[in-house]
Amino acid sequence: MNPLAADLDHVLAHTQELWEELRGQRVFITGGTGFFGCWLLESFAWANDRLDLQAQAVVLTRNAAAFAQKAPHLATHPAVQLHAGDIRSFPFPAGRFSHVIHAAIDYCAALELFTGALEGTRRTLDFAVQSGARRYLLTSSGAVYGRQPPDLTHMPEDYPGAPDPTQLRSAYGEAKRASEFLCAAFREEHGLQTTIARGFAFVGPYLPLHEASAIGNFIADAMKGGPIRVNGDGTPWRSYLYGADLAAWLWTILLRGSPARPYNVGSESAFSVSQVAQIVAEEVNPSAEIIVVARPKVGQPAERYVPSTRRANAELGLTSWIDMREGVRRTAAWNARLLT
């Protein structure tokens, strides 16, 4: 029994009418071993089995053995085929593909991150054209907007801001901006239906609990008994979309999104980081102490990283069906199962 069965039924309930387009088709996915990729593969395999789609997902990976250890039921699923290679130079798999999803990026030093991301996006776009793919999805990021103004509660897709191109910390956002440009150029020059999903922040199974995610770190702290450590003053505002909702959004944008028209992907329900820590404590370990390392600076407005999702809602009918509290509970329960 798949422990994500209820989540995957949820995804299928909100995407069932879309899957007919993938019947008997082949999908190529990069980044299939990460948070986005695992949710895409879980939902793909579930829909494939439940609807007898006879579809196939070919997944690019640099380490098939590591993926097989992480998710053996996916690595050995008959509809999933692993394809070895680096995103910048992978050999093109033979045959035709109907859809390509590019969700891979290497987090490394700034220059390597930027150049590697562009090379990877260009290679997957070239592959999509050569393989005869109709549609292509780029998982981009809210980082393309740069710093969100404190008086702008929710970032819309038409916000004209951008990262500071002279700062090395802008490498990720600039790489995603340039990748979006490549998508627009390939649509214009090759007729490839390129779609763009700008991700914000997420919670759910497969979220790494010990990396650069505040909510993931809080859940890990709570599960260990506390304290829950807030590395900062707790004032920044964040919102979190649950993984099952994310999967439904990504498949919908791939299959129904307007080409070269970005869609923010996230939740509009915002909380301060201190509030997030408190919610995690309440849902995972009410006895855990919360430690906020720094004090807020007087007169300094709080940082925000919260999307407006009106476009996705109005054009594609997408919304946050599972709230953050429930998402925290399910994330903790899934990780607790891994420890038993």
Image (tube, helix red, strand yellow):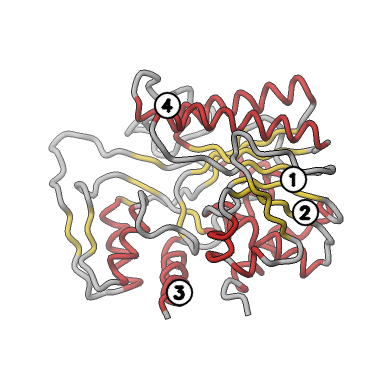
Position of residue 177 in the picture relative to residue 170 (left or right): right
Quadrant position of the C terminus in the picture: bottom left
Q: In the image shown, does 189 or 306 lie closer to the viewer? A: 189
Q: Do labels 2 and 1 touch, CB within 8 Å?
A: yes
Q: Is 13 left, or right, of 72 in this rendering?
A: right
Find residue 338 and name its label: 3
Q: Nearer the viewer, mark 2 or mark 4?
A: 4
Amino acid residing under circle 4: Leu
The amino acid at mark 2 is: Leu
Residue under pointer 4: 111
Residue with the mark numbered 2: 18
* Mark 2 neighbour class, 10 Å CA radius: few under 14, some 14 to 19, many 20 or more: some
What x and y, as percent, mark residue 319? 58, 52
Whole-angstrom CA distance, mark 2 to mark 4, is 39 Å
- Image-based side of 184 in relation to 286, left or right: right
Task: Please give the name of the residue rendered at 24% of the width and 63% of the height, measured from the top-left corner.
Answer: 228
Q: Earlier in the sequence, mark 3 or mark 1?
A: 1
Mark 2 and 3 residues: CB-CB less than 8 Å, in contact?
Answer: no
Residue 93 lies in quadrant? top right
Which of disc 3 and disc 2 is earlier in sequence? 2
| Mark 2 to mark 1 CA distance (whole Å) | 7 Å
- The residue singled out by tag 1 in the image is 255
Percent across and percent down for residue 137 are: 67, 40
Other-residue count near label 4 (Cα within 10 Å), few / some / many at <14 / 14–19 / ≥20:
few
